[in-house]
Amino acid sequence: MTKRKNLIILCPDQMRADALGFMGNEVCRTPNFDRLAERSVVFERHYTTFPKCAPARGTLMTGRYSHSDGMCTVQQTLKPEQPNLCRSLREQGYQTAVFGKNHCWADEDWSRLDFNSWCPELVAIVEPKQLVEEIDFQAEGLTPKRLHRGWDYLGNGTRHRPDEAYTDQSIEFLERLRDPERPFFLQLNWESPHTEYGVEEPWFSMYDREALPALPCSMPSNAPLSVRAQRRHRTGLEDNPKAAKEVQATYYGMISKVDALCGKIMDTIERNGLWKDTVVLFLSDHGDYAGQYGLPEKFDTHFPDCLMQVPLTISDPDLPSGKKVSSLCDLASVAPTLCDLLGIEMLPNVHGESLLPVIAGEREIEAVFADGGHERGMREQYKAFTTPESAPEPLERSKTAVYYHEPESMARSQMVRTELHKLVVRETGDNEFYDLEKDPFEMNNLWGSPEIQKHLPRLYEQLMRWNLKTLPESPPLDWFTV
């Protein structure tokens, strides 16, 4: 029997697509990601399905939109009984290894991995790093009154972020620990460039703050509550271009560091002759404001392309190297595509469809979808909204302040995006509409303008059909007997 292809997934956290060289960024230095793209199929318009870590990673593993399974916060994991790609690969004979943050699997699945970051063979590699002394941002004039909230993520220390260790563990697995007689699945989850914004030299000083092409740091016109509330309670209502540039430069430095780690993995693949029988997939779970709109990090109910558009490249010995795919696609299609490429059994009840016909030019995807936020009952019960002292971060320095002071900013929201338009609909109203051809940075919310009326029926229909396709049965499917 012919041995099946191996699978490697490289997943940095919170990496926006437009920060990469092969996606058109002429400033941020990503030679290794660019090198990987040259030998891969590149999806130029790939979007996440939820602008938050755990729900997006759940979709990556299941091919299902997160609202279908109730996975809408970072505290939730995949249900122990839920089919997912990692479990399916293990059951079909793959050796499985995941290094880096989990943010997806229940303890039961995590403990069944053949290797993870805390297994006895590898735990010694993870050692605390010496923190670099932080720059005095107050002396630099970057913390005026109110602005320290949110921008206090800044720093040039490594913040005990062991991405180098996770990379070394992955190399150890590839070179020594894997069983050469079995196909393997390796997922490397780098923590960077997720906030806090901090990286050591030489990456911290790699980008000249003054010379950076600026992202728009003003609040958009007719901005939704999700943006207004963040500005009120995190970074202040006054624009601060200098702070925004500092965030952008540090974020780019973090990406360049991860790029160097990617180079180590690629060299290991080359050294061990793995390109010929391995699928290598590179993507991220969601993007980052990086100072855009005067904001740090991301937010559950805000869907600009800086948060939604994420990289996706697939290197496969049977796919054309360097091919660029311009069709829209989203994260729900990744798992079905991998099932097809690996020749394994398709996951049950997936919402996404394999992208192989899209790669072949046989199909175009007209729209992509996303959702976020919580229904009213959840907002009334979730502790971060009602008892800030129980929240994981202090009220004055995190999104918890927004949740607590303005819980309506987290109202259930859904997005439909086509090539030219984006519609966001919220439980509470406060909707958004953007003409993406004229307004690519989404600075002018046209909701309420007469000119958009002709586009709404089609977008509403697409959103309704998506809900009809993806909302779960009640009672659940496994309640029925045949």
Image: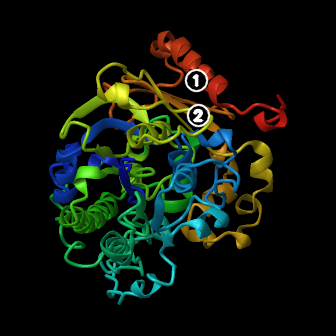
Rendered residue at 21%/36% (across/down):
320
Q: State the SS at label 1.
A: helix
Q: Residues within 10 Å of mark 2 (few under 14, many from 20)?
A: many
Q: Amino acid at mark 1?
A: Leu
Rendered residue at 58%/23% (across/down):
463
Work out whether 64 lies above or below 264: above
Instruction: Name the residue nearer the viewer: 111 or 400.
Output: 111
Rendered residue at 37%/51% (across/down):
3
Which residue does the numbered mark 1 point to in the structure image?
463
Q: CA distance from mark 1 to mark 2?
A: 8 Å
Marks 1 and 2: CB-CB under 8 Å? yes
Q: Amino acid at mark 2?
A: Gln
Q: Residues within 10 Å of mark 1 (few under 14, many from 20)?
A: many
The percent position of residue 275, horizontal first and vertical second, equals: 23, 54
Which residue does the numbered mark 2 point to in the structure image?
414
Quarter occupied by residue 124: bottom left
Rendered residue at 46%/62% (across/down):
95
Residue 481 horizontal side relative to residue 300, left or right: right
Of labels 1 and 2, earlier in sequence is 2
Q: Which quadrant holds the C terminus?
A: top right
Instruction: Name the residue nearer the viewer: 187 or 368.
Output: 187
Instruction: Name the residue nearer the viewer: 373 or 432.
Output: 373
Work out whether 370 lies above or below 416: below
Q: Is residue 162 visible?
A: yes
